[in-house]
Image: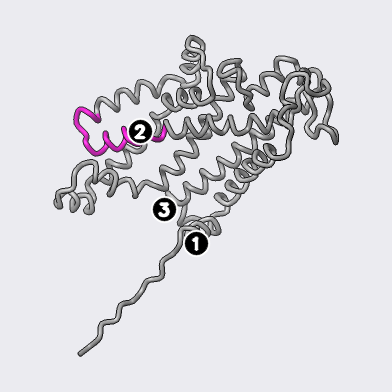
Amino acid sequence: MVERTSIEVPSVSLATRFFRLVSGNVLLLMGLILLAAVIAFTVLGYLFVDLELARLNSAPLRQPPSMEHWFGTDAVGRSILALLVIGTPKTLLIGLLAGICGITIGTFLGFFAGYVRGWADTFIRIISDVLFVIPILFLLVFIIEYFPVGAVWIMGVVIGLLSWMGTARTVRAQVLTLRERAFINMARASGAGTWRIIFVELMPNLTSYLAASFVQAVSGGILFSIGLEVLGLGPSNSQTLGWSIWWANDYGAVLRGYWWWWGSPVVMIVIIFLGLFLTSLGLDRVANPRLRASS
């Protein structure tokens, strides 16, 4: 009698897979390092920086960087370092909320339109095309001007509700190429319903692309929020990086030579965008077989 021996396939942990992915992707690694540095700056800032110095007249006026105030102070007596520690996570929160809302709506509508087709596809495509030609920043300025935003999370949601069109169009195009593949036809033949095919069969094939799109949506949300805040719109009672630039511009920091006032938030914004951009490029290499082959 022949004994059957089972071959155990060693399971690969999620951490090991992540390490293999990052170690072979320089762009992704650099982007994650920059984003981790921003998060570390915020966490350490909340632990070691006196955030009371972000209040008006809590520090000497217009002081350049020194040992007492590393990033200097502004014209209303606030520590620039304390403002950065408070403003960075709020700016990131706006981008995350905008990315989550935009990607969720765009993914749902894109999958539904691309797989179901018919009148649903026509209706979603028309709405998407109409909104796509309208400049989002102009629409946001119009909405926030007449319906003031009083909280950071509301601003993130509003931006996300108006930035789903690109994701919906691209996801729809991807689904149209996948819906007639053999594995989808086998799923239909086995009696799988529409939503099971969408979530179980189709969505896993677009995970890498959706991750890259999410990072891009976060970048877009931060960019729109900063643009609105520099114009004096948005949650004025919440200190963000965009409002730091608005204050510097309103007090003429550039003309008066207070470079540390506007320079610090600009540098932080550049680091955030560079980290998100490199992360998006790295994820795009994972999602795009042609880029993987060329690297």
Give the percent coordinates (x, y) of residue 162.
Answer: 42, 24
- In terms of secondary structure, what is the magenta stretch mainly? helix
**Which mark, residue 55?**
none
Q: Is residue 148 left or right of residue 124?
A: right
Separation of residues labelled 3 and 1 (CA atoms) = 22 Å
Instruction: Identify the image quadrant of residue 77.
Output: top right
Q: Nearer the viewer, residue 212 or 47?
A: 47
- The residue wearing badge 1 is 16
- Secondary structure, mark 2, is helix
**Which mark, residue 289?**
3
Q: Is residue 250 left or right of residue 223?
A: right
**Compared with residue 288, is residue 122 higher up or lower down, i.e. above or below?**
above
Give the percent coordinates (x, y) of residue 33.
Answer: 61, 48
Q: Nearer the viewer, residue 17 or 135?
A: 17
Say which label, 3 or 2, has the lower sequence index.
Answer: 2
Number of dots carrying numbers: 3
Q: Are there few (<14), some (14-19), or many (20+) residues within 10 Å of tag 3?
A: few
Q: Residue at x 57, y 19 (%)?
A: 235
What is the span of residues highlighted in magenta in the rendered image?
102-121
